């Protein structure tokens, strides 16, 4: 991947890529693999970008698709049964932010279903309902209600942890 | 006061270590090593399967009365396995410490050499397999008489004017020679078809990876 492309087209969005990859991984090694794969896929698919949406939307969408694909592959490999709304694996101790509240929030996010994780991350990144719907590929009308439900769920998980 | 998730999110990421992007450096190396390791595994399994099959067929051939076929199969496949095992040993010598591009290049050279050697073998291999089956069934015991001879007797009863060469109907010899010729001629294509069926996916991934790296280097 050329460093120019990385600096100009990926690095400005590295924040959201990192945040997304963190939400779908439990270890530093996995996180680095996911991050690198996302960057590689963005670079590979750059010629398919039709400018029908913003570049940032494109980047988010690819990041999300790659994370979901890798997660699916990983699940198939370990033949691990995961229901709609849980991630059972433990997070590595050394794979943590320096902010404890953020770690708790991330742990709670990882307990959500894969799509709910994406929605709440995009919401927290202050994306509009329309943008979230565009990235997820769903109806914008449902996003608001779904965000509210996810927040309630997160609050419950966080309260359970704190208490 | 209890903080909202929005606040936790914003404040958490203001901390310095939260958003450090990992370096993109080793991905291609990892990918190339992974793909080639997969190929090696498949190749080894394939060789083991050939050995197991040839041995099993050798035993079965004695039970079903075509030991000639079994022995020729066993010897031919053993030679094939020995040659390919030697080729595999060369593959193990490729330096994993080289850059991913050099590694892939070296692997590609090895792959082309392996294909060239096997194409040469396959031009002989398929005709030998066909011949072994003909011989096996020809000499198969049919109530004290070889099956081939019995067949010729039956033909001669029906068509007494059949031309024979070394006791074999000329037309039968002609058909056998034609099939042998076709197998020798199309041996490379049969081998490539077989190769593609087993390793096509791996080779495709490898090609894509090479293209990626080459476009990055250009």
Image (cartoon, coloured by chain):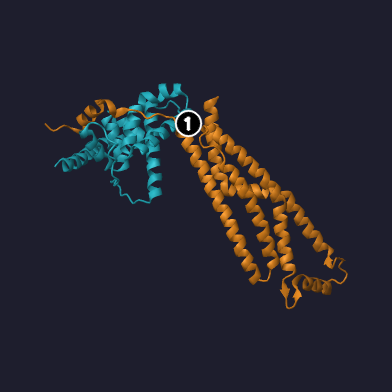
Chain colours: A cyan, B orange
Total labels drawn: 1
Image quadrant in which you'd find residue A146: top left
Q: Which residue occupies 75% across, 72% down?
A: B147
The residue where tag 1 is placed is A44
Residue A54 can be seen, yes or no? no
Q: Which residue occupies 40% across, 26% down?
A: A10
Mark 1, Cα crowd under 10 Å, few <14 / some 14-19 / many 20+, is few
Q: Which residue occupies 56% across, 43% down?
A: B92
Q: Determine the chain carrying the residue at label 1.
A: A
| Residue B38 on image: x %, y % | 51, 45
Residue found at the very far left of the displayed protein: B1
Residue A160 can be seen, yes or no? yes
Q: Which quadrant of the figure contains the C terminus of chain B?
A: top right
Nearest to the observer: residue B158 or residue B59 = B59
Left or right of A6, for residue B11: left
Left or right of A153, for residue B173: right
As drawn, B175 above or below A160: below
Give SS at disc 1. helix
As drawn, B141 above or below B55: below
As drawn, B166 above or below A101: below
Image quadrant in which you'd find residue A131: top left
| Residue A76 on image: x %, y % | 40, 48
Q: Which residue occupies 66% across, 54% down?
A: B79
| Residue B122 on image: x %, y % | 69, 50
Q: Which quadrant of the figure contains the N terminus of chain B?
A: top left
| Residue B209 on image: x %, y % | 52, 35
Left or right of A70, for residue A102: left
Nearest to the observer: residue B128 or residue B162 = B128
């Amino acid at each position: 991947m050329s460093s120019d492309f990385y600096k100009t087209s990926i690095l400005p969005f590295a924040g959201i890529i990192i945040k997304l990859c963190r939400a779908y991984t439990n270890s530093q090694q996995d996180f680095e693999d996911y991050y690198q794969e996302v960057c590689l896929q963005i670079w590979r698919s750059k010629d398919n970008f039709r400018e029908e949406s913003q570049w940032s939307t494109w980047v988010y969408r690819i990041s999300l698709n790659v994370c979901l694909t890798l997660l699916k592959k990983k699940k198939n490999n370990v033949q691990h049964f995961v229901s709609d709304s849980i991630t059972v694996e433990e997070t590595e101790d050394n794979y943590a932010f320096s902010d404890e509240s953020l770690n708790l929030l991330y742990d709670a996010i990882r307990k959500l279903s894969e799509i709910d994780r994406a929605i709440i991350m995009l919401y927290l990144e202050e994306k509009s309902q329309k943008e979230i719907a565009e990235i997820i590929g769903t109806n914008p009308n449902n996003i608001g209600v779904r965000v509210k439900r996810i927040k309630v769920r997160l609050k419950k998980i966080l309260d359970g942890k704190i208490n | 006061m209890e903080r909202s998730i929005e606040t936790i999110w914003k404040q958490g990421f203001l901390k310095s270590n939260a958003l450090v992007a990992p370096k993109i450096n080793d991905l291609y190396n990892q990918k190339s090593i992974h793909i080639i390791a997969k190929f090696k595994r498949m190749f080894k399994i394939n060789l083991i399967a050939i050995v197991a099959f040839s041995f099993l067929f050798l035993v079965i051939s004695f039970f079903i009365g075509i030991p000639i076929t079994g022995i020729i199969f066993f010897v031919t496949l053993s030679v094939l396995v020995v040659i390919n095992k030697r080729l595999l040993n060369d593959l193990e010598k490729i330096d994993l410490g080289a850059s991913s591009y050099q590694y892939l290049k070296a692997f590609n050279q090895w792959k082309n050499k392996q294909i060239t050697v096997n194409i040469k073998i396959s031009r002989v291999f398929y005709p030998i397999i066909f011949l072994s089956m003909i011989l096996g069934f020809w000499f198969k015991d049919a109530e004290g008489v070889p099956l081939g001879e019995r067949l010729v007797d039956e033909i001669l009863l029906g068509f007494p004017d059949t031309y024979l060469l070394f006791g074999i109907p000329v037309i039968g010899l002609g058909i056998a020679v034609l099939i042998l010729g076709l197998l020798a001629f199309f041996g490379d294509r049969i081998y490539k078809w077989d190769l593609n069926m087993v390793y096509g996916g791996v080779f495709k991934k490898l090609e894509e990876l090479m293209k990626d790296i080459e476009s990055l280097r250009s």
